[in-house]
Amino acid sequence: MKKNIAIIMGGYSSEYAISIKSGNVVYKYLDRDKYNPYRIVITRERWFYMDDNNQDYTVEKADFSLIVDSNKITFDCVFNAIHGTPGEDGLMQAYFELLGIPHTSCNHYEAALTFNKRDVLSTLKPYGVPCAISYFLNKGQDVDADAIVEKVGLPCFVKANRAGSSYGVSKVYQKEELDQAIENAFKEDTQIIIESFLDGTEVSVGVITYNNKVTVLPATEIISENDFFDFEAKYLGKSKEITPARISEKQESNVRKLAEFIYKTLGLKGYTRSEFIFIGDVPHLLEINTTPGLTEESLLPQQAKTAGISLEDLFDSAIVEALR
């Protein structure tokens, strides 16, 4: 009997449109012989199912069900394609865990931890995971530009702490630019993280559970035409993404081991994609994404393809593992 699969997409953040694209790709490639896929759009105003005729039906939040043509539809599994809140920060995960509905992403605590850049880096540093030097700032606190520069140096990166797709990120070269960069980051979050600049090769590494085994995918080398891997570079063609990355065997071995170590140490599940910058042969962790982009052009699908995993198999595996 075919399983009913809810593909949740949208969300409350600036990544809404990107999430819709990811969700529609999942919807396109799910095997109709095994699954009945339903596109569920999550917004602050309402949650609704969108059918192929663009007719929508409101989701009953009490049990995450639908009424379509007088028939009640419940779901065997949820495929999470929401980037940002509430799909990547643990809120939807906690909701589905309370309802007892399997979902394809990691559990709620791990999602909340990894979405918070400051917290996850602080958690991993005692394990010896190399990271940039960082300075934390909350909205309303006094900005001490001299203290920031003394700790992290220049240039540095100012980032929204809980945001994705490079929203709220600025590269700062002069102390006088800090105020504007901080103001930009606070548009996305009430917490920011200011990090030292790491000058080296940037790579992205996907780690998934596939056939009941933690699997590290081939690394992607990121070469941005802009000053860093910003929104334009990620989504508007202003970068080169080379998979597999042009790195040495030692670098490849080091980053694969570290990516797998982080996945297992944090108790992650489903898909993850982590960003690193090499200083010499040592990969330094930048951040972890637990609902990475899933379009045909996105990094994780690129890496899966290089590993011989089709989109159909990639998406099917997420459901199989969630149901397992």
Image (spheres, rainbow, N blue to C red):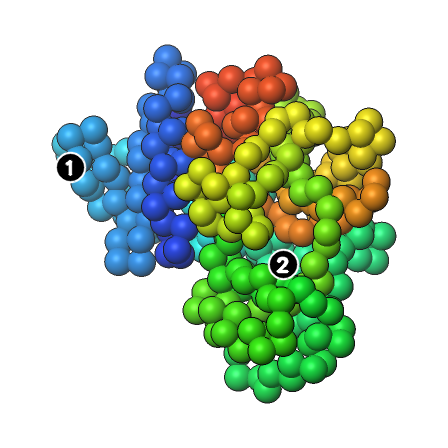
- Between residue 4 and residue 261, name the one nearer to us: 261
Q: Residue 7 occupies which quadrant of the picture? A: top left
In the image, what residue type sits under mark 1?
Answer: Gln
Do we see residue 78 in this rendering?
no
Outermost residue on the bottom side: it is: 142
Choose top left, top right, bottom left or bottom right for residue 117. bottom right
Residue 45 higher or lower than 260, as above or below: below
Task: Provide residue 19's location: percent of width, then percent of height.
Answer: 39, 43
Residue in the image at 31% along x and 35% along y: 39
For the C terminus, the quadrant is top right
The answer to whether residue 79 is left or right of residue 194 is: left
Residue at x-position 75% and y-position 63% = 133
- Which secondary structure lies at badge 1? loop
Q: N-terminal of the two: label 2 or label 1?
A: 1
Residue 115 spot, x, y in % from top left? 57, 55
Disc 2 residue type (three-letter): Lys
Marks 2/1: CA distance?
38 Å
Of helix, strand and loop, which one carries label 2? Answer: helix
Residue drawn at point x = 31 percent, y = 53 percent: 43
Q: Nearer the viewer, residue 252 or 99?
A: 252
Residues 23 and 250: in front is 250
Q: Quadrant of residue 258?
A: top right
| Residue lying at 37% horizontally and 13% vertically, measured from the top left | 33
Q: Which residue is mark 2?
A: 117
Q: Which residue is mark 1?
A: 55
